[in-house]
Image: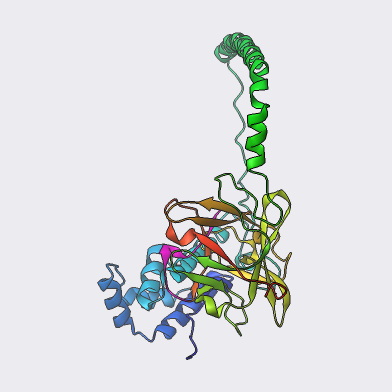
Amino acid sequence: MAEVVSAPDPQHARSPEEFIARMRALKDWSRLTYRELAARADAAGDVLPRSTVANMLGRATLPREELVAAFVRACGVGSAELTVWLSVRQDLAARTAPGTGAGPATAAMTPVRFPAAVRFPAADEDATPPEPPPTPQGLLALSSLRSSRAVILLSVLALTATAVAIAVSTRGAHHGPAAEKRQQSVRQEPGSGAASTSGAALPAPGTYRIRAVHSSLCLSEREGERTAWVYQVPCEDVFPAFSLERLDGGSWRIATRHPEHGPGCSGIVARRKVQGAFLVDDFCASRGSGETFRLEPVDRPARGFRLRPVHTGYCLTLPGGTEDPWAHVVQLPCQEGESGQVFRFDRVPSEAES
């Protein structure tokens, strides 16, 4: 099989200058001239004059988002890579904006197996302007408002007492044989998956192929690649083995066992919170809550589960429902009906079961 040469990756850009350098590398990878890039952008409905491309790649400041999108599309990368380029640009713009206190040195996109990057909030993020002193008219209105609040509070207390009395009188209806039967119906049977709130059974801990329902491809690293991004690939090519481990509080960990690096975990690179951040494999406990997931059963657009990183609440996604092999898995906001956010778990028998 011929080696697949990936497009340049912007995730390691630590400053606008490094981001521009990766854009130049992307142009070199595309092997397109300025004229050809402009023509391809025009065919896609974008406006990208060749002089604009030349000026953009020769500067040290971040281009506008629409220019980056048009340029990346013209270079020929897929929707998943475009999402990443735009998210990295957005992150750099936020970190280097005036007043954030974050310069190029703090804008690091931390590579896998290095310490996580730190996000610095804006200096005035929690600032609250002081209130002006009250006027005599304001004090009179405040006195009237306090009297009204006292009346409202008494009314609320009376309604609360009534509600408590009703709840106590009807409590026995929820603790009879029928209630006990309902509780037994959702109890977990030994060795089975736990019952979920929607009635779908959660998988039991064990070794699985994690399959994207829309494409029938499975999550995998690329064997021999230094940075362990997670892609969707034909299921027979999955590497390394993936397993599900249940954690306290109803959350899960996606564990891996690499033949060279040993035990590891899947997680969002550097525990980043931006949209489009990659799913990668690394040593466990290197990204904290970025490698902890919740499994959310869904019935639409297909039956399966969403995988939601705990630190953001986003969903693992194949952007746009792409069916392309070797498309990156990223985190994006969960959307009902988004086909690229639904996964299933195909059990892989252990050696003892084989």
Which residue does the image show at 60% across and 12% down from the upper left?
159
Residue drawn 72% across and 79% down? 261
The span picked out in magenta is 314-325
> Is residue 323 in the magenta section?
yes
Q: In this rendered view, identify the residue nearer to me: 205 or 275.
A: 205
Q: Nearest the camera: 94 or 203? A: 203
Q: Is residue 85 visible?
A: yes
Q: Is residue 313 visible?
A: no
Identify the residue shown where x is 52% and y is 75%. Answer: 235
Picture quadrant where residue 274 is located: bottom right
Horizontal side, residue 38 vs residue 235: left or right: left
Residue 326 in percent (x, y) is at 49, 76
Image height check: is 228 above or below 191?
A: below
User: How far across and down, in percent of the image, does residue 78 sit?
Assistant: 41, 72
Q: Quadrant of residue 256?
A: bottom right
Is the residue 181 above or below the residue 348 in the image?
A: above
Q: Position of residue 49 (x, y in %)?
A: 29, 73
The answer to whether residue 93 is left or right of residue 266 is left
How many discs appear? Answer: 0
Residue 29, x across and y down, in percent:
44, 84
* Quadrant (top left/top right/bottom left/bottom right) for the C terminus: bottom right
Q: Residue at x 66, y 55 (%)?
A: 192
